[in-house]
Image: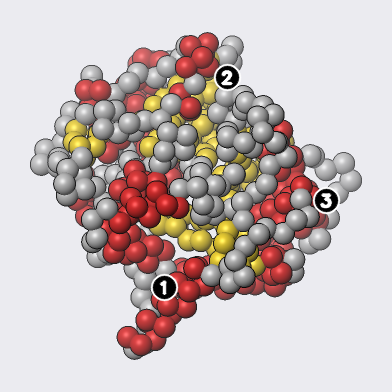
Amino acid sequence: MSPTAPDNLFPLPLTAFERFMLADESTDYPMMFYLQVRLKGIVDRDVMKFAVDEALSRHPLLCSRVETTNRGGHWVWAGGEIPKPDWDHERWMVEEPWRQPIDLTTNIGLRVWGEQGSDHATITIQFHHACCDGIGAAQFLEDVAIAYARHHAASTGATAELPELRPLNLELLKNRNRAEGRRVANVSGSIVRRIRIVMKYTIRYLAQVKLPLLSKATGDDGERHPGLGLLSLKLTRAETRGLRDAAKQHNASLNDLLVRELMVTAQAWNSNISNKQPRLLRWKQPTFCVLVPISLRGPSDSELPACNVVSYIFIARPLMLVARPDELLISVRDEMQLVHESQAGWMFIQALKAMERIPGLLRLVMKRSRKNCMSTIVLSHMGNMLNAIGSRLPKRDGRIQMGNLLVEDVCGIPPIRQGTAAALSTIMVSGCLSITIRCCPVGFPQSDAQELLNSLLQGLRQTATTTCPPPKGAAQAHVSVSV
């Protein structure tokens, strides 16, 4: 049975960030992100359908489409148009859904396809970013896992005690764009001081140019990416602990350290491809920039269904500073601490709202900047996402048990914008850092993506071993390729 429309919720006006996601996408660069789950066992497809339908009924924006209006558009219910998961591997490899944009005016922003082997299954979930952010997607995944476990237990007569789904309040979706109750930018001091701070960062942004990652491919010689083109690696516990210790030496977080490592890797990568300096206006300072999504959720959002309560932070550093790794890490640490203390990510949302006050300005800005590099790399840190699922479901052999299935691995990847060659996501799995990369399918071949990931791995290992040398015969980091 398809999910039913909630009462008194639709039509639901789009927020500034949702409109930004729609304005910033193009046919070749849709604003879509992915979660991919690897399971051990044979998926009961009937039970999975019940589980997905139950989860969708709790997250209405994943069952909705967009109606455009003179006031910016709104969400309308489209629960009767939910596509079925595609388990035909040969068909979806031919149709390549990852290359097909989702038109939210005619379709919902969710697709699911899967591949079942003799004893393993891989399920890929594609989200349009206008519908929800990574935290919202993780909420949906948790609901699917728990609902599958419960439905499977009911179908087999199992008596094991299983958790209930977390309480959600659909009415909170009406307030997803409001600052009340959330962590909002709060710059202290007089109005003169606040204006001076805003002007400082505005001028700094305008005086910078973000350098893209260079590709070794020339012309049309770049090979086509196989499938979705995800590449993953998993560090050992010792290596992960070494990275944490390296960050602690500078009172920084693991995420701060990863931003530093990406900038250092980007500079070494570009230097190995070309020694030529970019031709820029003299007042434009070349920088490497890492875009970091940051949640704006507060205590009042514990029962909020999947949606976008997220912003962007652009961490840009000049080439000379990138060449000094210790100073670079301290600089990144200080900026991220300031961001968290004042919730500076909210300023990006405020800037979007300000541009929307002038009709057509946001789309004009997006159109003029579409071919420019907004950031060198995107880094989305998913943290201990599996803990939310693993703490509520039983475990077997150290893995989360989901009915007759065991969850072996989860990875995700954010969207790729034109001008940005690579997007990465990180997640902690059983105390090990797992990193997934997807590179631009246009002009950045898969061989470059693999080499870039190898370069990052080499730098991470070097950083980790300076604080925690691995024992002889230590296990190598696991590297995998996925469609």
Mark 2 Cα shell of 10 Å, populated few (<14), some (14-19), many (≥20): some
- The dot on residue 120 is 2
Q: Which residue is at a point 30% across and 56% down the rendered structure image? A: 361
- Say if 1 sits above or below 211 in the image: above
- The dot on residue 342 is 1
- The residue beneath circle 3 is 470
Q: Which residue is at a point 70% across and 36% down the rendered structure image? A: 217
Q: Secondary structure at mark 3?
A: loop
Residue type, mark 2 in image: His
Inspect this view and state whether residue 141 appears. no
Q: Secondary structure at mark 2?
A: strand
Calculate the distance from the C-alpha at mark 2 to the C-alpha at mark 1. Answer: 45 Å
Name the residue nearer the viewer: 428 or 396: 428
Inspect this view and state whether residue 334 appears. yes
Calculate the distance from the C-alpha at mark 1 to the C-alpha at mark 3. Answer: 39 Å
Q: Position of residue 210 (x, y in %)?
A: 58, 58
Residue type, mark 1 in image: Ser
Using residue 224 as the reference point, say whether residue 46 is left or right of it. left
